[in-house]
Image: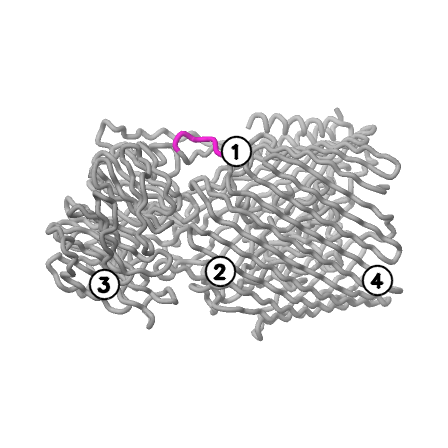
Amino acid sequence: MNKKMKTSIQLIALLLIASTMTSCKKDEPEEELPTEYDNGYIGQMMILNEGAFGNGNGSVDFINPSTGERTADVFNKANNQPLGDVVQSAFRYGNQIFIVVNNSQKIEVVHPASFKRIATITGVQSPRYILPVSSSKAYISDWGDNSVKIVSLGSYSITGSIPVNQNGPEQMAATAGKLFVVNGGGFSDDSTVTVIDIQTDQVITTLTVGVNPNSIVKDENGKLWILCGGDVGLDWTGGTADDIAGSLYRINPDDYSYELIISLAQDEHPLKLTIKGSKLYFLKGISGFEGEPMVMNITDTALPSVPLISKTMYGLGVNPDNGDIYGCYSPFFGQSGYIFRYSHTGGLMDSVKAGIAPSAAIMNK
Amino acid sequence: MKKQLGLFFICVLLSAAVKAQQDTVWLKTAEITAGRMKLFAAGVRAESSDSLVQQLFAGESLSMIPFSPSLVVKDYGAGGIATASIRGMEARHTAVFWQGVPLRTASLGLTDLSLITAGPETEISLYKGSVTSLFHTSTSGGALILKERLPFNTALRAKVRAADASFGRRQVGVELVTGSDKLAVSTGADYLNSKNDFPYINNTKAGNPKERLAHAQENRFSAKAAARWQVNGGSELHFAAWYQFTNRNIPPMMIQNISRSSQKDSSFRVVIGWRKSAGWWSWQITSAWMDEHQRFDDSLSGIYSKNNNKMLFNEGAVIISLGRQISSRISVVYSHNEFNFREYNGRKYFDEWSLSNAWSLDREKFRSSISSRIMSRNGSFIPVSFSAGTNTILMKDFTLRASISKSVQLPTGNDLFWHPGGNPGLKAEHAFSAETGFDFNVLAFAEAAITAYQISVDNWIQWIPVSGGLYAPENIRKVNSRGIESIIKIPVQWKEFLFKTEFKYNFTKVVNRSSGQLLANDILHKQLIYIPESSYSVAVNLIYRDLTLWFYYIYTGLRFTTADHSYYLPANHLAYGAVSFNISGKNISVQPYLRVGNLFDFTYQIIPYHPMAGRSLLAGVKINFNHK
């Protein structure tokens, strides 16, 4: 072999070595994962990170309320699979957590301690919320065909579908043998609540409320509170002349009477109503997608004049043990958000990084 | 991985072991031969596609053709779009030209490579770096230039192609080429039907089931015709027309169960020109008309979208030669772009004028050029773009290249008019770039080149959340891209064997220098999404008499999918192979060939959760009539 050849082989070998080096990776120490037999994530705040639509990077984190430490992407860690997107909502019922993943057209059922998958419910098109009403039956609201799906919790399969004949069935509440489904408008507008008999799965009646109801909770007196976002108008930005104001309704679920109606100002569009004891929490903003955390008592007849926290959030949650408020902050669907923790009086306690587009904080108990 | 490296080693050792000879028939490194590029783009290096690859991939879309690690294709897979990025820039910074006319739609500001097909008579060239001032369209990252070959003095040749491939893919194509000393004509058509129902392991679902891609069928038809006619001394008319339609279903992502999305695209493009040479000066006029329709339906999400882009393009240019060494080109372009989206609240338009002037000095060991362009859109003047470059032969087989440029990237129709969010107050992006490099021969038989570049973009347009769920574009970022590109070509001839090996390596570091976004610190100085830092390719071609073997391997490094690097896709290793054999008769040759895609059956994704096909086989035959 002549000298030229040698040199060329050396050159090529060098190139090879350089290129293969790029694929070398250090092994990371394995994290010890909780099992079903210990407390695992129970008693921690569950953070739902929506993920970016179509990117499959939705996730669930847990924040330990005692230490403030975050455990990221627990579904992926427990099951070695991504959760999908958009992580729309979650509900704990007994020893199961139901995670509704909208664009992935599924509901993952996991163990609350280990987050190991128990089952996956499919057969839905654009699921939004799930509400178990017994150990054998749950309902799923589905934008895909404007229906409420009936789920057998024995087989984790869809056993029926109830058309609501309205737009965008959204959050649900069950009381007095009836299921109340707010119809949030989906890709258009709506202003109704569909009432379904849980025994027969028949639509009993349809109630009219404010424009685009987005959330519903039952208070300790058995009354239903319905938050209506209103409409931001054709310009999508809110705060303009074509806005339709948001509103808050209290309804008696027995006779469907309207006990209280609070109209917000024209450019106020509330969302994400949640309840802890006698206090209602929600976000109020001008865009209809985010807002500042508000708090009011269920005995109040008017909204507070100022928000509890002067920071615009994409979602929120309340620790039922101590009233701490978890504000979900999402700067951009292309990067991680943050969780800001406040005391029940609104004082900032700490903050921690979250996943992509954190949108809700729910106590895992 | 071991298998890939093993094969790679064998190829490398083979290439080095075979004795080199000086009388190689390796084709000269491809340089852009279009007039304005050859004369006025000194200091900038180009790559052109290998003619063998073009034969093997004739009739395929540009996104399917293995080309170069310099061209980063963001491919959504079967049924999805595919866009190109060069030197860390985005798809909107990459221009695609056909017959000298931009294909980028004014509304979207990008070209979907999955809709652009290349026949065996289409020359494809990749121009890296900005040559904005030579064109009417910005090319901050680079440009792909497509040109139909039209040789004079060619007897009538006909080529018929048919292929059957994995996953229900069938394609047929035909080309006719002829040329007298005055008239050259070529025409061709391609039809493709593919189920794209490839199997894949769905690791996003319980039990990692093996699934087949569903709802991914694609139909495509493309017909082209081109002609040039030398009318009389120095005067030439040229014409090209291209009709294409593509109907495709868009499959569900791995994280989904069903999809009801589909997209239909159709386009008609025609270019007519006249050029005349009169001794020391020549002139040319070109007119083009392009009409593109797209319809997207998704009954699941309730999205039904129709859009239409039309463009009238007129260019007049004069080239003057001042002696043997100095040339100048002056061109005036007028284009009218009309586009109609439901989300624009009606039809919008861009009326654009540009005036460009370029000068070149061409001496025996020194070639340099300088060019500038001023432009207006809808009556508003756009800042000047310019470039300057030089090629200097420092010694035998050693040439220095250097160039600088400033280019101006205008906002797209979507940026300005999309409702909601469109921002009519957007400013143009400004990109400053500089590059330098060397072309040299190694050991007298191998060609090599190395280039280092830097691009700095101000007023980078980024869609960001401005109010709740509403996104709007803002001139919010400053982006820096710098990198190194290298290439080594080793041709070896031994007896009747011709062995060609080509290595390309790219390093690209592209980061946000500053951003006015919320929590900007989490994304600053981090590699931009979908741009690999490192990528390289190896192409090996062995020709023995009528037998041809081809192997291509490309490594694409890790790519981040979120701006803060919280998510990424691992590196991928793709290999292709082909074998073809030529059986020649008196007036006919038959060429059966076998092509393998994703040779090592590597599981990979280019966009998260959009599955890509594993190993695929394509068996085809080409029949060339009157091939000599």
Label 4 element class: loop
In the figure, A211 relative to A89: above or below?
below
Callout 2: SS? strand
> Residue B620 location, x and y as percent?
70, 36
**Label 2–label 1 contact, CB within 8 A:** no
| Front-most of residues B595 and B174 | B174
What type is the residue that disc 2 sits on?
Ile
Chain of the residue that carries numbered disc 1 in the rendered image: B
> What residue is shown at x 33% (from left), y 30% (from top)?
A31
**Residue B599, image x and y in percent?**
61, 31
Give the residue type that dot 1 points to: Pro
| Residue A326 shows in this picture | no
| Left/right of residue B625 with respect to residue B459 in the rendered view | right
- Residue B165 in the magenta stretch? The answer is no
Q: Which residue is mark 1?
A: B199
Given this view, does label 4 or label 3 mark the residue nearer the observer?
A: 3
Q: What residue is shown at x 85% (from left), y 53% (from top)? A: B179
Q: What is the three-letter code of the residue carrying label 3?
A: Ser
Residue segment shown in magenta: B206-211
* Nearer mark to the viewer, of 4 and 1: 1
Q: Earlier in the sequence, mark 2 or mark 1?
A: 1
Nearer the camera: disc 3 or disc 2: 3
| Chain to which mark 2 belongs | B
The three-letter code of the residue at mark 4 reads: Arg
Disc 3: which residue: A247
Label the magenta part by its dominant secondary structure: loop
Q: Which residue is mark 4?
A: B324
